[in-house]
Structures are given as C-alpha cells and as structure tokens.
C-alpha cells in the first residue's frame, strides 16, 4: 500500500476507531464473522482475530488456548538451542485441509440495528379494513362468509395490536385462531390467499411431523424456522408473520393407550409457550439444529398462529351432546334429527373440542374458533366458474393455446358437482372429475386442426354421449371436416 493510499484511508476513517493489520482491509458487508471454536457471532463474542483461510477466532478462545498450553508446561524457550519466537521444523496447520471444514459456515447475517425513532413496527394505515380484506377474499374464495368475516376481523385486530403502544397500561392479547371444517372446504386456501393479500411472510406446516423433544421427527421450533425461511432470514419481518399449522387434530390426546404419547398431548404442551409468545432459538438457513449451523433468536409474541384441522370424529361428539337434550313428548326433539345434518360442525363448542382430545391450556391460547361450512352442489358449481383462478378458466386457457374454444353447459356443471360431492373430499374432487372426462379431449383435439370449438354436455360428463364439436368452417374460419378417428374417440362413452 502506497503512502497516498494510506492517507486516503486515514482521512476517510478519521472518525472511526483505529485498526491495524488485517482489519484495515476488512470490507463492510451484511454478514458478521463467527468464532470457529465457540460458534459465537461477533456482536456477542466481541472483536474477532482473523488468521489465514478466512478463519476467525474470538479473543476468549485464543486466550484459553494459550492458557492450556502454558498449563501443560509448554514453552518455546525451553527447547535446546531455540531462539525465542522461532520454532524450526514446525509449520502452521492449514485448517482448510481438515475434513469437514467449511469456511462459508462462519458467516452469519447481521441483525439490523434497531432504530432509535419511535416509529411503529407496522403502519396501521397501510393495513386494509376488515370489509376490504373480506372483499378481496371474495374474489378468490367462494362461500364461507362467516369464516371470511371472522378471519378479516381477527387479522385486522392482530396488526392493530402490533402497532399499538402500552403506555396506558392496556396490552391487547393475541387473537390466534382455530379453524374447524371438513376436508376440502378451503382452510389452507383461505389462509394462503389472506397472506398473499396482506404481503406478510407465511409458513404452512403440518402437525403430523411434530414430536416431543428428543424423539425422531421435527421439533416444535421447526415451525418458526420455516417462517424465518419464508421471510428470507429477516428476523424482524418474520416476527410479524403468520404460521398456519394444518392437521392440528392429529396431535390430539390419544385415548385408551398405555404407550407414551410423543406426538399427541406432549406436542400440545410444548406449543403452549410458542402460541403465547416466547424467545425461540432457531437455525438460520436450515431446518434442523446442528453444530455447523448458526442460530438466531425469534420472538413469537407478534406472530399470528392459525391452527386448522378436519376433526373427523367431532360430529359424533357434537351429536352425542345434542342428543342428551332430547326428551319424550309430543314436542320432543328426536334423537336422529342430527344424523343427516351436513353442517353439524357449525354447532361445535369448546367443550366438544376438549373432549376430542385437545387440552384446555392449548384451547385457551386459541381464543378465536372458526367453523367452516360443508360445500353444497351449488357452492361447488360456483367454485368451478366464479373465482379468478377457477378450474374451468384454467382449462379454457389450455385449449385456447391450441386455438380451440371450450364451453360448458350449465347442466354439465351440476353433473360435475354431483359426482364431486359423492367422493366426499370437498373441492379437491372437482379437479379429479374434470380430469377424467377431459383426458380424451386434451389428447385428441391437438391431432385435428379443423376443430374450432368444443362444448361439454351433461351426457358426456355422465358417459352417456359425446361433446358437441364445432368445426372451423361453421365458425367462419375454414371449411373442413373432422377426422373420423377423432370423432370416434370423442363420441364413444
């Protein structure tokens, strides 16, 4: 380094503390060094001492190394014919040649410094009002009016809680939610759409993989680790995110079992502090904890938890509770009046969920309980055609890329909904039913360039006939006939 270069550095950094050696060449990046021995970051362990091959050691570990060498009686001056400070025949060990050494693991993303100004973490003016949140959900989610209303209010109050101060001594509690509904009714889709509208990080995880600490499976803190990854390892952004834990009914307390319940009640016990708000140590850039992965602290106090599950046997518990109210007489309630009620879950209470196997402490930290409605044939027809990304619009777009127009008769839509409802898997069955009768069309149409329009009829859905085919000549595009083999493949039931 020339004298001019040295003068430029001293003038530019005259307000900074003086540094010597390799620290003068140090570049300011968004990462900080980690001690190779104790794995502590620089903001915890203090100034690092850097040796070749990008290795950093904190002063405490280096001092302990010297103390251990002195304690063993080792001294360079004790060697015969040895000049102090020189060790002939002994060279430094190249740590990069050791197996398993990874210099890239010794970098940890710096935590953003906290601003001194008293600006709120979230500007409440930028969060839409509940009626606007519900209006946005209506564009993508059909039905479930009560659930969308409850979720809009709960999310709006949650972010008002983050923006509020506690100077007056009033602290708003979290509004964690418990969603109960049959499979395929739109629980996960509703949460995913809500997070996309609010532009907040969202982590969707499954409770079936969670086990008690010390057993094979994911730790309870892994749900926070997924949220941190969804926020691009930004701790501040992750602390204002949403975590959706699906299949929450699978961690219910097991009944009549003599074995240790490592994936049931113990998981509920471990999630209590997580739901309420606690400092959780999670790995950065990985899903499991190990010695080579840096750790960071995440506060779950401002994270909104939404738990959802189908609770398949909850209807029987609700029916049993309602049947106890039946009596004898002319105006008595019949014991079988609830047998054919599809929306029996709408009458579920907290005591029913507790009897299902969820402990009271867990339910107490989920104050908002949302019950989803069962999907009717009319709702399934609306799901087919009304949302922005409706299934029918997807197939229309696919055939439009082949310059073929696709249309559906109204009777055909109700036939599709009837078949889907028989499968008893909710809206997921719609795609399976459509894919079954659209297979021949998607296979045969690209063979014949003369086809201009295909109309799906009720007979074709019920396998009693074929679709209505319109050639390009009848549409004013060209005068040609459909190939015989294409017509035979489409008409045959």
Image (cartoon, helix red, strand yellow):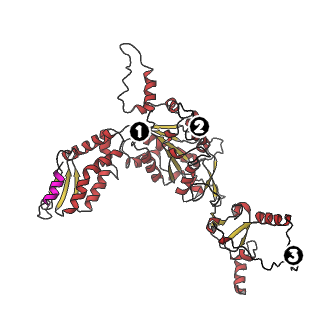
Considering depth in this image, is 478 or 93 the residue closer to the camera? 93
**Looking at the image, is mark 3 or mark 1 nearer the viewer?**
3
Residue 79 circle label: 3
Residue 472 placement (x, y as % from top left) = 15, 61
333 to 84, vertically: above or below: above
Dominant SS type (magenta): loop
Question: Tag 1 or tag 2, which sits nearer the N-term?
Answer: 1
The answer to whether residue 488 is magenta is: yes
- What residue range appears in magenta? 474-493
Residue 377, quarter of picture: top left
Residue 182 circle label: 1
Neighbor class of circle 3 (other Cα within 10 Å; few <14, some 14-19, many 20+) is few
Considering depth in this image, is 258 or 112 the residue closer to the camera? 258
The answer to whether residue 337 is magenta is: no
CA separation, marks 3 and 1? 80 Å
CA separation, marks 2 and 3? 62 Å
Cβ–Cβ below 8 Å for labels 3 and 1? no
Neighbor class of circle 1 (other Cα within 10 Å; few <14, some 14-19, many 20+) is many
Identity of the residue drawn at 76% across and 63% down: 61
Identity of the residue drawn at 33% across and 51% down: 390
Residue 346 placement (x, y as % from top left) = 42, 33
**Looking at the image, is mark 2 or mark 1 nearer the viewer?**
2
Q: SS for tag 3?
A: loop
Considering depth in this image, is 177 or 418 the residue closer to the camera? 418
Q: Which residue is mark 2?
A: 260
Residue 148 circle label: none
């Amino acid at each position: 380094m020339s004298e001019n270069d040295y003068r430029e550095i001293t003038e530019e950094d005259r307000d900074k503390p003086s540094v010597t050696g390799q620290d003068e060449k140090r570049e300011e990046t968004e990462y900080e060094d980690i001690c190779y021995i104790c794995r502590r970051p620089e903001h915890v362990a203090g100034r690092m001492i850097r040796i070749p091959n990008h290795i950093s050691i904190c002063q405490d570990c280096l001092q302990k190394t010297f103390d251990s060498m002195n304690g063993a009686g080792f001294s360079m001056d004790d060697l015969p014919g040895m000049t102090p400070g020189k060790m002939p025949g002994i060279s430094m060990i190249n740590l990069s040649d050791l197996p398993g050494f990874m210099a890239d693991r010794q970098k940890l993303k710096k935590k953003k410094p906290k601003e001194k100004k008293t600006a709120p973490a979230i500007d409440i003016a930028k969060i839409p009002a509940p009626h606007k949140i519900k209006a946005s959900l209506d564009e993508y989610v059909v039905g479930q009016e009560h659930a969308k209303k409850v979720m809009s209010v709960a999310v709006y109050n949650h972010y008002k809680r983050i923006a509020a101060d506690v100077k007056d001594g009033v602290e708003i509690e979290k509004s964690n939610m418990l969603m109960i509904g049959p499979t395929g009714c739109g629980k996960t889709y509703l949460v995913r759409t809500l997070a996309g509208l609010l532009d907040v990080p969202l982590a969707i995880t499954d409770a079936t993989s969670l086990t008690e600490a010390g057993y094979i499976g994911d730790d309870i803190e892994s749900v926070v680790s997924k949220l941190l990854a969804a926020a691009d390892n930004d701790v501040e952004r992750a602390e204002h995110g949403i975590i959706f834990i699906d299949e929450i009914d699978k961690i219910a307390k097991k009944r009549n079992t003599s074995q240790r319940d490592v994936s049931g009640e113990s998981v509920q016990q471990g999630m209590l502090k997580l739901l309420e708000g606690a400092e959780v140590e999670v790995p950065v850039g990985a899903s499991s904890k190990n010695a080579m992965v840096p750790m960071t602290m995440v506060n779950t106090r401002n994270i909104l938890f939404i738990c959802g599950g189908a609770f398949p046997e909850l209807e029987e518990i609700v029916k049993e509770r309602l049947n106890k109210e039946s009596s004898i007489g002319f105006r008595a309630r019949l014991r079988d009046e609830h047998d054919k009620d599809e929306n029996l879950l709408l009458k579920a209470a907290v005591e029913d969920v507790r009897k299902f196997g969820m402990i009271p402490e867990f339910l107490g930290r989920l104050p908002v309980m949302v019950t989803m409605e069962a999907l009717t044939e009319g709702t399934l027809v609306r799901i087919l055609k009304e949302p922005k990304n409706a299934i029918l619009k997807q197939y229309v777009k696919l055939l439009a890329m082949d310059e073929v127009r696709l249309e559906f008769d109204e009777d055909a839509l109700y036939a599709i909904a009837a078949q889907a409802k028989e499968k008893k898997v909710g809206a997921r069955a719609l795609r399976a039913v459509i894919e079954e009768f659209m297979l021949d069309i998607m296979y045969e149409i690209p063979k014949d360039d003369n086809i201009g329009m295909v109309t799906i009829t009720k007979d074709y859905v019920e396998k009693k006939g074929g679709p209505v085919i319109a050639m390009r000549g009848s549409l004013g595009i060209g005068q040609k006939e459909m190939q015989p083999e294409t017509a035979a493949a489409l008409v045959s039931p």
